[in-house]
Image (spheres, coloured by chain):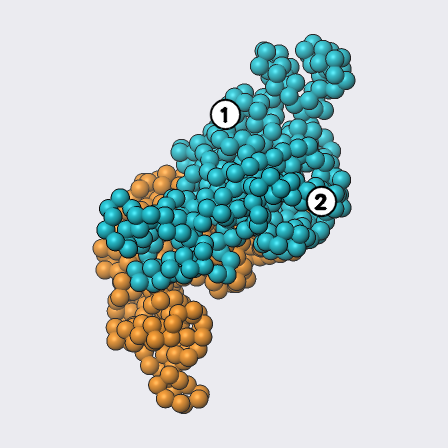
Chain colours: A cyan, B orange
Amino acid sequence: MSVQYRLLRLLRDLGPQSRAELAGRLEVPRPRLLAELDRLVEAGRVLEAGPAASRGGRRSTLVELHPGVRLAAVDLGASSVDIEITDGRLEPVASYAEPCDIRSGPNNVLARVTEILGKMRGQGHFTQLDAIGIGLPGPVSFRDGVPVSPPIMPGWDRYPVRDVLAREHGCPVVVDNDVNVMALGEQHSGVAHTVDNLLFVKIGSGIGCGVQVHGQIYRGAEGCAGDIGHIQVEPDGPVCSCGNVGCLEAFFGGVALARDAMSAASSGQSPMLAERFAAAGAVTARDVADGAAAGDVVCINLIRAGGRRVGQVLAGLVSFMNPSMIVIGGGLAGLGHILLAEIRSVVYQRSTPLATGNLPIVMSELGPRAGVAGAAVLASELAYRGPS
Amino acid sequence: MSVQYRLLRLLRDLGPQSRAELAGRLEVPRPRLLAELDRLVEAGRVLEAGPAASRGGRRSTLVELHPGVRLAAVDLGASSVDIEITDGRLEPVASYAEPCDIRSGPNNVLARVTEILGKMRGQGHFTQLDAIGIGLPGPVSFRDGVPVSPPIMPGWDRYPVRDVLAREHGCPVVVDNDVNVMALGEQHSGVAHTVDNLLFVKIGSGIGCGVQVHGQIYRGAEGCAGDIGHIQVEPDGPVCSCGNVGCLEAFFGGVALARDAMSAASSGQSPMLAERFAAAGAVTARDVADGAAAGDVVCINLIRAGGRRVGQVLAGLVSFMNPSMIVIGGGLAGLGHILLAEIRSVVYQRSTPLATGNLPIVMSELGPRAGVAGAAVLASELAYRGPS
């Protein structure tokens, strides 16, 4: 890591610092550090921010990131787009969200992203972006900046997302899988702060997992690490969308839960779900959450059964990986304590005792913001690493 | 990593090099590199080894590791001890193996290790060791150099293995879990050379797994990563020695296979095993391997069933970790192609296609030497990292 990169990251995470403080935090010979800082100041990337408390001369002058740094963080979901513009310290300057069907293809979706960014530029939130970070709901080749055979993204396979956005916006772009991005967000700005070995489990329409190892995103040999939704939990289970049988996603996740809720509604097993079904023509995960909160036994049992399946997979992964923390996020994290309690119960009972002795299993702190928070971190790493 | 450490590692892995070659391989300013090399020469750790081919003056003189460097690599198994003395390039100078019951406790076992090392010293293989690396068949706190609640090592819990050996032999000692050590051996000197993300699956009496991530041993938060023998494969399976039900080890591994072979022998299902049983009073994994080689259907099916269970667990881990290679080792790797074919078949069918497209699943190349080979690597890293 270059000294300039490390300096910029420190200023991102700590805010204005004196030169002496920066020198104390980096193991770099002081003259070298001061020279690199001067170069950043000359390049306009870092500004003198007035004297530090001690007021002792040049070395106690505070420096800070240029306040005009602008990063765009984009979180594309199966059915939504979230965009945040942040400054160099990752503080949100503006944000925007709207429904967006990923299946409408890369041309439409990315044109819409560009339109939204254009509108935000028009509103004066930035004039030029320093970098864009974007998370996609499918496997991504991080190196190439393209999705790779993403199951729920028809038309996106190997589409040059990074290069198209970079050309459009004249700035560097970084593309990653949405769960990797959420894990990074939670680790940088959320509940997993300073956690080195992290599992971030996203339970949305499907189920995926972001993995952090030794403090860094772990992507695996082909960039598809964390694809836990298709781990088999039952050899004779239901057929999954992937063609195999008994995958975790065939049992739980938004799609499976809606299926089971519909069946409980139409069979009349759950009067509450039947009522919702009669009123709206469909029932969703949200209705199950409401039902559980109101004490509907069928809804509670659906959540418990799902939690058990997730716990079953996580128990194996905990024995294998011995993580420092598990964070549960994604839309179905809203199912709340019943889900969490069931996951905990299975993992704590099933995994190696040594691996569970100090293992927190907690809800995401950033909630729906985890994706943009992580995309902003990725964008900043790219902006600060670049040649300068 | 210090420059001296990196220089010593290069000389370990590449043999004698000219100063120019070393400078070309390390991204260190040349004057600094030459100064560090001179310091190593002055300290007697590196020797001038005569002129390089070009014969052009000081910079084309070859340097090499001091030929007197001696490392001890110790591989303690459940029922055996293997010791190798190597030079600084990890070439074996002497080796020794004997049966050894780990359950006889740390005092007895480590006294025997010291006795063997004393004998090897007496035979002139070394006068002073530069470091000892030792692998233990159980969870280890790498930082503290002690076993932690090791299930098959009564009396060893938190026994100060590192400190006792260090005091006895007057050299630094490094202690690790046996599968971590075997994975390292395979990665440094075996089939997994240059593989960054590696699963090394040891199928012996039990089943464990060494994990390499980004080229480094991954130990997890508490040092117990890779404990895959206790991942549940069947919710209503047999009771495991750990107290849970349906663990992988309750289905397969040396202990489970011997149990199933005994049952096939005594029930007369397999005439071949029955014959062995009548002759020897017991049957072992070895007999199952022989039976399978001779075409005994019961033996073949026992191996296939075990391979399916191992494959079932690995399929999930492949989807999760997306490794670059899986290596199968340990005593039961001797079951050979039937086992490997079954594991491959399940993993290739069950895991995410993207993760299996380029995934070699192969037998250990080092076989029973994997442990000492890895322990020697660990010892060298310790010896070369030390203050100098």
Q: Chain of mark 1?
A: A
Disc 1 marks which amino acid?
Answer: Ser
The quarter of the picture where the N terminus of chain A appears is: bottom left
Residue A276 position, x and y percent, is 71, 14
Judging depth in this view, the residue of A329 and A378 nearest the camera is A378
Residue A234 visible? The answer is: no
Q: Which mark is residue A199?
A: none
Q: Secondary structure at mark 1?
A: helix
Using residue A14 as the reference point, say whether residue A116 is left or right of it. right
Query: Horizontally, is B135 left or right of A61 in the view?
Result: right
Badge 2 is on which residue?
Answer: A111
Q: Within 10 Å of the Cα at label 2, are there few (<14), some (14-19), or many (20+) other Cα atoms? A: some
Residue type indicated by callout 2: Ala
* Mark-to-mark CA distance, 2 and 1: 45 Å
Q: Position of residue A224 (x, y in %)?
A: 62, 47
Count of numbered tags: 2
Q: Nearer the viewer, residue A292 or A349?
A: A292
Residue on which the image places disc 1: A345
* Secondary element at tag 2: helix
- On whether disc 2 and disc 1 are found on a single subunit, the reply is yes
A205 in relation to A279, above or below: below
Q: Residue at x 66, y 28 (%)?
A: A254
Q: Chain of mark 2?
A: A
| Among the two numbered marks 2 and 1 on one chain, the one whose residue lies closer to the N terminus | 2
Image height check: is B23 above or below B170?
below
Task: Give residue A82's position: percent from left, percent from top.
Answer: 61, 36
Instruction: Give the percent coordinates (x, y) of residue A359.
Output: 43, 33
Name the residue located 49 percent from the left edge and 43 percent from the top edge: A87
Q: Going by the image, does B219 lie left or right of A242?
A: left
